[in-house]
């Protein structure tokens, strides 16, 4: 019984590392009532990296800064802003780093080229095999 | 040719092994700098964050003199740690303005009473919107703003005693 009570108490305790006493921004954890707009916002949020927990997207993160970014993104989508415009705005501030969406930057050409290169190599290998098979 | 090709997978393996091992062993230091350094401060207007200090707007930061813009919060522990260094900067004649992130006036008042108040003006950024607009990724951070309202330097994390010479030099350079 005591253990159970302790467990329940744990459930309701606030974490020691609580980041801010303020309640979350209006749209941090609330969806936009228009499903089409919410879909747009959600798709963007999933590809924006959280600045506090750097391996999570802001859609996944509980950090207060991520909550504020979610709210800001939803509010701007409601105001009619295009998701790609918001992404560009964020990249202007934090660099390519903030977006999970790979860009066409020359640095990333190997990333786009590698699959083609590997398929090409595979085909070459396959051709060699087939030729060899025919001969024997 | 064929002889050499046989070694290719091993060479590739060794290459990837070294890549991953160095990635694992290197300390993870991912500080996200603002890309707005060297550019004008974005426009903003914030309400007052403390009872005895005026509010802060971006227009008020264009004063012809370099200033320090400190991003802090009453709930942030390293912000308390850098308070003595900010006091030292103020005593050295530096004008410091601040933005309090996700904060409330009574909390800011209490924080300033406890750790000292080196700020001329303090704006309240309750939803981190200005923080995001200037490309800041956490608290505390400090920006050197030159006389024309351009960001010339960003210091990430709390200001330690040995950071003071750098910051003073950056403020002088921004003149």
Image: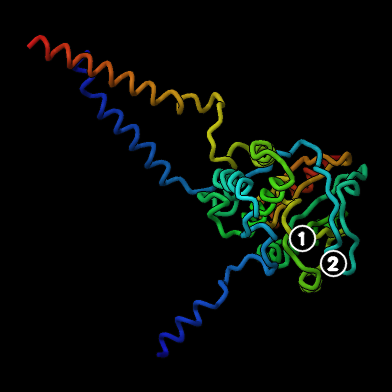
Residue B12 lies in what quarter of the image? top left
Mark 2 lies on residue: B50
Residue drawn at 57 percent across, 60 percent down: A62
Question: In screen coordinates, is A71 left or right of A17?
Answer: right
Measured as percent of width and height from the top left, residue B158 is found at: 68, 57
Tell whether label 2 touches label 1 (CB within 8 Å). yes
Quadrant that contains the N terminus of chain A: bottom left
Question: In screen coordinates, is B56 left or right of B170?
Answer: right
Q: Chain of mark 2?
A: B
Say which element carries label 2.
Answer: loop
Neighbourhood count class around disc 2 (C-alpha, 10 Å): few under 14, some 14–19, many 20 upward: many
Mark 1 lies on residue: B100
Measured as percent of width and height from the top left, residue B65 is found at: 90, 44
Residue B146 against residue A125 in the figure, above or below? below
Instruction: Please report whichever mark, 1 or 2, sits nearer to the chain's N-terminal start.
Output: 2
Say which element carries label 1.
Answer: strand
CA gap, disc 1 to disc 2? 9 Å
The count of marks equals 2
Quadrant that contains the C terminus of chain A: top left
* Residue B109 can be seen in this image: yes
Q: Name, please, the residue furthest toward the left.
A: A136
């Amino acid at each position: 019984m005591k253990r159970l009570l302790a467990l329940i108490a744990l459930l309701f305790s606030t974490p020691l590392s609580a980041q801010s006493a303020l309640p979350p921004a209006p749209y941090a954890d609330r969806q936009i009532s228009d499903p089409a707009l919410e879909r747009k916002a959600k798709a963007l949020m999933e590809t924006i990296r959280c600045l506090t927990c750097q391996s999570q997207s802001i859609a996944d993160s509980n950090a207060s800064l991520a909550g504020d970014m979610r709210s800001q993104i939803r509010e701007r989508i409601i105001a009619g802003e295009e998701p790609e415009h918001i992404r560009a705005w964020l990249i202007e501030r934090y660099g390519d780093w903030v977006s999970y969406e790979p860009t066409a930057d020359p640095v990333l050409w190997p990333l786009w080229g590698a699959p083609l290169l590997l398929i090409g190599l595979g085909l070459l290998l396959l051709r060699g095999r087939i030729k060899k098979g025919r001969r024997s | 040719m064929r002889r050499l090709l046989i070694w290719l997978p091993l060479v590739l393996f060794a290459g990837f092994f070294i890549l991953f091992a160095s990635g694992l062993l290197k300390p993870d230091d991912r500080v996200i700098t603002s890309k707005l350094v060297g550019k004008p401060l974005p426009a903003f207007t914030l309400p007052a964050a403390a009872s005895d200090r005026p509010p802060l707007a971006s227009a008020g930061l264009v004063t012809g003199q370099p200033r320090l813009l400190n991003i802090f919060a009453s709930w942030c522990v390293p912000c308390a740690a850098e308070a003595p260094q900010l006091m030292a900067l103020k005593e050295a004649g530096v004008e410091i303005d601040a933005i309090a992130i996700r904060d409330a006036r009574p909390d800011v008042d209490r924080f300033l009473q406890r750790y000292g108040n080196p700020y001329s003006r303090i704006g309240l950024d309750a939803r981190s919107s200005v923080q995001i607009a200037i490309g800041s990724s956490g608290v505390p951070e400090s920006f050197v703003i030159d006389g024309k309202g351009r960001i010339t330097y960003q210091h990430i994390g709390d200001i330690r005693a040995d950071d003071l010479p750098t910051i003073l030099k950056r403020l002088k350079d921004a003149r």
